[in-house]
Image (tube, rainbow, N blue to C red):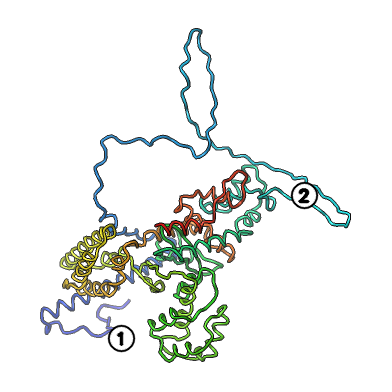
Amino acid sequence: MHRLDSVRFFTDVPPPPSLSGLSRPELEALLVELFGEVAALKQMNSELREEVARLKGLKGRPKIGPSGMDKGTEPPKPNQLAKRRGRGKVTPRVSIEEQVLNTPVPPGSRFKGHEPFLVQDLVISVRATCYQRERWITPDGRTILAPLPDGIEGHFGPELRRFVLMQYHQGQSTLPRLAVLLRSMGVSISKRQLQRLLTENHEAFLSEAQDVLRAGLETSPWVSVDRFAKRADVPKGVRSTDTGARHAGKNGYCTQIGNDWFTWFGTRSSKSRLNFLDLLRAGHTDYVLNYAAYGYMRDQNLPASTIARLMADPEKRFTDQKAWLAHLDRLGLTALSVTPDPMRVASEGALWGSVQSHKFLCDAVVLSDDAGQFEVGRHALCWVHAERLVHKLNTFTDKHRAAQQRVRGLIWDFYADLKDYRLNPGKRRALTLRARFDRIFRGLTGFATLDRLLARLHANKAELLMVLERPEIPLHTNGSENDIRCQVTRRKVSAGTRSDLGRDNRDAFLGLAKTCAKLGISFWDYLGSRLKVAGQAAIEPLDHYVRARTRYA
């Protein structure tokens, strides 16, 4: 071990300044700077400790709760009635079968009617049917086989397939547990057969999920987006900044797009803006050069000469990525090595041109948590995430803590007034709120780190105050975070997916289940309608309901 007198400064670490020659303000500034460096080192040390705990399988530090700004700014609820109300009358969703119960009575008794007693029960039974299909040979040698009843596809009936899809996707069961459950009920089924029921022959569901996304992007005044990283599993009890399962043995990212009427999920290997714009095409594969594409390129500082070269070429629409890259190669953009990357910016612009050409997000607002890849079109920011930056700011002195609490109080009051503005918008109130925003986020607190953060938030003024122009949009992305929890739960109970088909089916069914819940449709009834269960009422395609909701919202 080194003795204390043998310890020397490293060559890359500057020697300490002569403190005796510094004035009091200079000493205070140096102290604040050192406090900031210590906080950064503590943060790095904490992350390293968590990584060591994860590798050792130990328990990590507890999770710090949110600030509670949204709930804290809700108006006070009226006083509850002194007497607590009961649960109300039970109304079953099925037809009620009446059965009269008799009882022996002594002679001379008078009949006083019946006293109802409602009992709900569940009938679970397994039925196996062997269809003896007539087979005929026509005079010309053709074989005619009697068709199977409607809804029969394969050797498992529609009710069993509905039960499997319901339990796996909405019930969040695992495949092994579901196999054990079915076998215990008397169904002869293997894990391989069960896997096929979950992933094969669901093209209609995948197509309907795509149609739901297209309907939402075409008609919604706003969409909220979020994503979570699908990373390798961590031991139980250890915190992870990005949580999720793996796909095909690799890390990936799940993106949520939705609003109050629909939800859609898409899992891909990238979280870039190229990937997000590709998802916004909703299944289309074309690249389009139009006014929207050129405007995007200008906003991203693509050189005017490069844009002119793209505009001069007569070809404006390309069927797929291969055709688009070949076009860029002909124009010589693939050989350029400058900043910004012309190939990337041009591709993003062509993707945005494709989104606009299909009438997606033409006047809609994209609401996000300030992740850079989501900043496309008309963009708004989540206030809860913005306030969280102030809430989690490291403070070192009582003066810093007092400044932080005072700014948080101003933000909370301002947020409450924004919520009130959504209910009663007006031009005069909008002007007042804009001026008030400037006073809050341009003010100086004496806490340098907090002042820099406020200046950074003020730079996002247009996106944070988008609600003044569009009062119908929410002030936060809580809806997206609530939607994406089912993906996190699915990751916890089933780990990752192996095939692209399994990944797409998981995303589609979870999105359809969420959409049904938002539209007030039972997912059980929806599956019964799609699988042609006998006696099940027909349910229209979900994109019809989404269009109707957004049209009259």
For the C terminus, the quadrant is bottom left
| Relative horizontal placement of residue 535, taking residue 364 as reference (left or right) | right
For the N terminus, the quadrant is bottom left
Q: Label 2 is placed on what type of residue? A: Ala
Q: Which residue is more in the foreground, 439 or 486?
A: 439
| Relative horizontal placement of residue 175, taking residue 118 as reference (left or right) | right
The image quadrant that residue 42 belongs to is bottom left
Question: How would you rate the neighbour count of disc 2 (Cα within 10 Å): few for under 14, some for 14-19, many for 20 or more?
Answer: few
Q: Which residue is more in the foreground, 481 or 35?
A: 481
x and y, in percent, of residue 303 in the image: 40, 89
x and y, in percent, of residue 63 in the image: 34, 59
x and y, in percent, of residue 394 in the image: 25, 68
Name the residue carrying label 2.
Answer: 146
- Front: mark 2 or 1: 2
Q: Name the element at disc 1.
A: loop
| Relative horizontal placement of residue 461, taking residue 308 as reference (left or right) | left
Distance of mark 2 from mark 1, alpha carbons? Answer: 85 Å
Name the residue carrying label 1.
Answer: 12
x and y, in percent, of residue 426 in the image: 24, 63
Q: Name the element at disc 2.
A: loop
**Residue positioned 52% across, 78% down in the render:** 287
* Residue positioned most to the top: 108
